[in-house]
Image: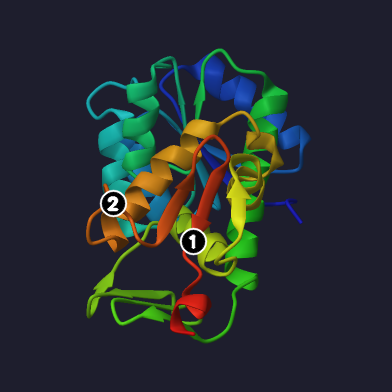
Amino acid sequence: MMDNRKILVVDDEPRMVQLITMNLKLEGFTVMSASDGYQALEKVTREMPDLVILDIMMPDMDGYETLKRIREISSVPVIFLSVLGEEQDRVRGLDLGADDYITKPFSPRELVSRIKAVLRRVELESGNRKSGEIVVDSDLRVNFDQRKVIVRGREVRLRPTEYRLLYQLVTNAGKLLTHETLLARVWGPEYQDEDQYVRLYITYLRQKIEEDPKNPKYILSERGLGYRFADYDKERV
């Protein structure tokens, strides 16, 4: 249920805050606001919102820096909302740990849809885990109960989105997963046109688990189609 979920809207434009607040309240959300990054940090700590909508272009402390500080104290989902629409801006936001990035101007319907999609992913992540440890080979072990990824004897920390993506790949080892399938399962059906999300996070995962990310042995590309995780059961036969 999305009712009564608390959303923190962080933006220095009062009209924008008013517009977002009105539309979210119509959907049953509880909404609070902050006009700068410092207020946002205080409210994340004190009010513990279920999701944060964060503008980038703010005085004193911009959204990028605000997100960095939020990630030091909380794993709350964050959606960037910004007039900065270039690919490098989106990549930077996602790289810092944002769960989504929406450019202005936007439709209220799109914003609500993206918020619900992110909240659903958080629910599924906490309640839909495969049990036990999967030993891929001597270099890679994944424990979905404990949310641990061990690479060559060392634990590697993954962002929530990276973890969801790895889960889909490992638990479907040997199977081709198309871009569309990964988008639907990891991000939600609302993201069917966001192929760059898949490419970006595949790159992140390879950098963390592959010995040679440019010549991966685990996450294999199927040109023009999608990705396939190496069939570790077959390899052991």
Q: Residue furthest front?
A: 237
> Does residue 103 sit above or below 216 in this rendering?
above
Badge 2: few (under 14), some or many (20 or more) residues near its Cα, within 10 Å?
Answer: few
Please report whichever mark, 1 or 2, sits nearer to the chain's N-terminal start: 2
Give the number of callouts. 2
Horizontal relation, residue 28 to residue 133: left or right: right
- The dot on residue 229 is 1
Residue situated in front as seen by the camera: 234 or 17 = 234
Residue situated in front as seen by the camera: 27 or 194 = 194
Label 2 secondary element: loop
Q: Amino acid at mark 1?
A: Phe
- The residue identified by callout 2 is 215
- Residue at 41%, 21% in the rendered image: 12
Q: Quadrant of residue 163?
A: bottom left
Horizontal relation, residue 80 to residue 225: left or right: left
Q: Horizontal and vertical percent for residue 185?
A: 64, 52
Mark-to-mark CA distance, 1 and 2: 13 Å
> Does residue 217 sit above or below 180 in this rendering?
below
- The dot on residue 205 is none
Q: Are the residues at dot 1 and dot 2 in contact (C-beta closer than 8 Å)? A: no
Horizontal relation, residue 181 to residue 231: left or right: right
**Res 102 visible:** yes
**Res 56 visible:** no
Residue situated in front as seen by the camera: 220 or 42 = 220
Q: Horizontal and vertical percent for residue 234?
A: 52, 77
Badge 1: few (under 14), some or many (20 or more) residues near its Cα, within 10 Å?
Answer: many
